[in-house]
């Protein structure tokens, strides 16, 4: 019975628990549904507020867009209105311009018509004057025929014979002048050969170009230089090929020799011996050999510096050394290396102006006198020696021809050879390039003026540009325009015959006519 009651209590308790759980669940569910409803209502309210905000924003955007479109439309209308006004102004200006042009054309047409009428009247007047002149000429011709007792055909024939005789006479004079010029050219070439032979052994100013002075620290050194019974000075002269002159000049001796390179070696060697103090034959030979070796290196440096200065590259080392030797070679007192550099620059500049190979022209100009480095020791002219050298070291054929032809020994085969000839003449004949005493310079200018003054009709002469030009003032009453040209040619011919000069001399004849009257 008790178990039954217990079971019943358990059932009742379980039922009560289930019912209480269901009530609790229902209450929780109701609470949750209420919260969900509140959340949904809040979300809905938020959505409605957001939608309202978005609606307002969109409305504002639409209004802004409409305002912007309206503004752009108004601006476009305003721009088109201004463009139309500008177009109207241009059309109006063009119409006014066309109107002015039409008026100008009409005015020019009237002026042209007036000028045409004037020219027509002038043409008629000229025709009448021509007819009158023809009649007068015919009458004058008839009168001349009556006075000369010959017809016009006979007068023309006489004039033709006179002209033929005069032409024959001038031709004969021209032939004689050509023959005389040929003789003069032959004499000049012979003189050039003699001068070149003299040049290879001496130069114009012997004192200035064949001696060097060595300063000594004291007079006692002179005795040591001479040595016992003169053995030191003999050993020095035998080793260098240069003569030592010991005179009364205090604290100095003079080295004399025609070879500048040997003289420079002797000068350096003597300075080293004097500075060292040990002077005896063995020491002299040792120092001279050492200086000769140093000089060989210095010659290479001088040649390289010259080629770099000009911009010529790829020369054979032996040619570079020979270029260095030109530093100690002179021609009429002009340094041959400086002359070669100047010729190279001039040739390059002229070649560039003529659109030729400027580098090749510089190379030919730099090497054109390379034979002068050896012409003292080798038979032949410096052009022949130079040609053999560049052939040996396989220089360009244009360079070979420029060297061989720069004194017109062979025929020119390249324009660059002509440029080298011109550059050589310019460098050698420019004022100050070659040594000339003041007395000789003044005498040359005076002689030039004397030659020009010797002609009839010449009033004054002026030698200018260091004797490169002579200006001749003539009397206008004695020399007419046609005779002025003949006078210039005659003066030039006489200068060529009687004077010796480098380059060329320009003869300018000036004839001035002055008409003078007085108002009273």
Image (spheres, rainbow, N blue to C red):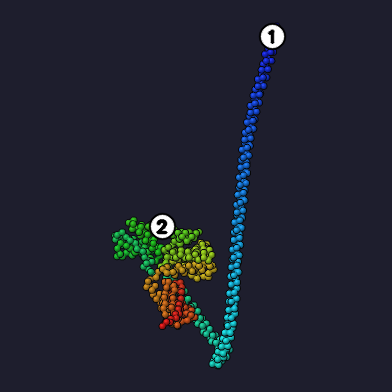
Residue 390 location (% of width, % of height): 50, 63
Instruction: State the mark number for residue 5.
Output: 1
> Mark 2 packing: few (<14 Cα in 10 Å), some, or many (20+)?
few
The quadrant of the image that shows the N terminus is top right
163 or 79, which is in the foreground?
A: 79
209 or 276, which is in the foreground?
A: 209
Residue 37 location (% of width, % of height): 65, 28
Alpha carbons under labels 1 and 2: distance apart: 146 Å
Q: Are marks 1 and 2 in contact (CB under 8 Å)?
A: no
Q: Can you see residue 450?
A: yes
Is residue 33 depicted above or below 14 in this figure? Answer: below
Of badges 1 and 2, the one in the foreground is 1
The quadrant of the image that shows the C terminus is bottom left
Locate residue 412 relative to residue 81 in the image: left or right: left
115 or 235, which is in the foreground?
A: 115
Badge 1 or badge 2: first in the primary sequence: 1
- Identity of the residue drawn at 60% across and 69% down: 102
Is residue 5 depicted above or below 416 in this figure? Answer: above
- Identity of the residue drawn at 61% across and 55% down: 80
- Identity of the residue drawn at 42% across and 73% down: 464
| Residue on which the image places disc 2 | 294
Locate residue 500 relative to residue 217 in the image: left or right: right
Q: Which SS class for mark 2?
A: helix
- Identity of the residue drawn at 49% across and 77% down: 182
Q: Which SS class for mark 1?
A: helix
């Amino acid at each position: 019975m008790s178990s039954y009651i217990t079971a019943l209590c358990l059932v009742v308790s379980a039922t009560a628990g289930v019912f209480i759980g269901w009530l609790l669940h229902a209450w929780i569910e109701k609470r949750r549904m209420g919260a969900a409803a509140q959340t949904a209502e809040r979300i809905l309210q938020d959505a409605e507020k957001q939608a309202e905000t978005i609606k307002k924003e969109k409305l504002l955007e639409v209004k802004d867009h409409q305002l912007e479109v309206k503004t752009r439309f108004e601006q476009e209308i305003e721009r088109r209105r201004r463009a139309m006004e500008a177009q109207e102004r241009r059309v109006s200006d063009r119409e006014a311009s066309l109107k002015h042009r039409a008026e100008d054309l009409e005015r020019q047409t009237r002026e042209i018509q007036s000028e045409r009428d004037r020219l027509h009247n002038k043409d008629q007047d000229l025709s009448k004057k021509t007819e009158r002149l023809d009649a007068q000429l015919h009458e004058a011709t008839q009168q001349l025929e009556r006075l000369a007792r010959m017809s016009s055909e006979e007068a023309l024939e006489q004039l033709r014979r006179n002209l033929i005789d005069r032409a024959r006479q001038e031709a004969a004079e021209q032939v004689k002048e050509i023959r005389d010029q040929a003789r003069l050219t032959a004499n000049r070439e012979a003189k050039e050969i003699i001068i070149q032979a003299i040049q290879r052994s001496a130069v114009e100013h012997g004192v200035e170009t064949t001696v060097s002075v060595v300063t000594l620290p004291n007079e006692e050194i002179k005795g040591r230089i001479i040595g016992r019974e003169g053995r030191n000075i003999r050993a020095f002269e035998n080793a260098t090929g240069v003569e030592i002159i010991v005179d009364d000049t205090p604290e100095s001796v003079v080295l004399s020799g025609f070879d500048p390179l040997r003289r420079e070696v002797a000068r350096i060697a003597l300075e080293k011996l004097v500075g060292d103090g040990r002077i005896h034959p063995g020491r002299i030979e040792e120092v001279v050999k050492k200086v000769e070796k140093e000089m060989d290196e210095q010659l290479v440096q001088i040649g390289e510096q010259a080629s770099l200065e000009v911009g010529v590259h790829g020369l054979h080392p032996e040619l570079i050394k020979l270029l260095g030797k030109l530093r100690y070679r002179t021609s009429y007192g002009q340094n041959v290396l400086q002359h070669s550099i100047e010729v190279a620059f001039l040739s390059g500049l002229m070649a560039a102006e003529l659109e030729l190979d400027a580098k090749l022209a510089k190379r030919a100009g730099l090497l054109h006198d390379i034979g002068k480095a050896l012409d003292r020791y080798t038979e032949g002219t410096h052009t022949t020696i130079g040609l053999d050298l560049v052939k040996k070291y396989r220089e360009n054929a244009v360079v070979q021809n420029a060297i061989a032809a720069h004194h017109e020994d062979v025929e020119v085969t390249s324009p660059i050879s002509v440029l080298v000839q011109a550059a050589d003449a310019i460098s050698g004949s420019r004022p100050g390039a070659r040594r000339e005493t003041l007395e000789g310079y003044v005498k040359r200018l005076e002689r030039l003026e004397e030659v020009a003054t010797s002609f009839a009709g010449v009033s004054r002469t002026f030698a200018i540009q260091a004797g490169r030009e002579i200006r001749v003032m003539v009397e206008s009453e004695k020399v007419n325009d046609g005779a002025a040209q003949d006078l210039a040619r005659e003066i030039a011919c006489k200068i060529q015959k009687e004077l010796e000069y480098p380059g060329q001399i320009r003869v300018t004849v000036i004839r001035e006519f002055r008409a003078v009257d007085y108002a009273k």
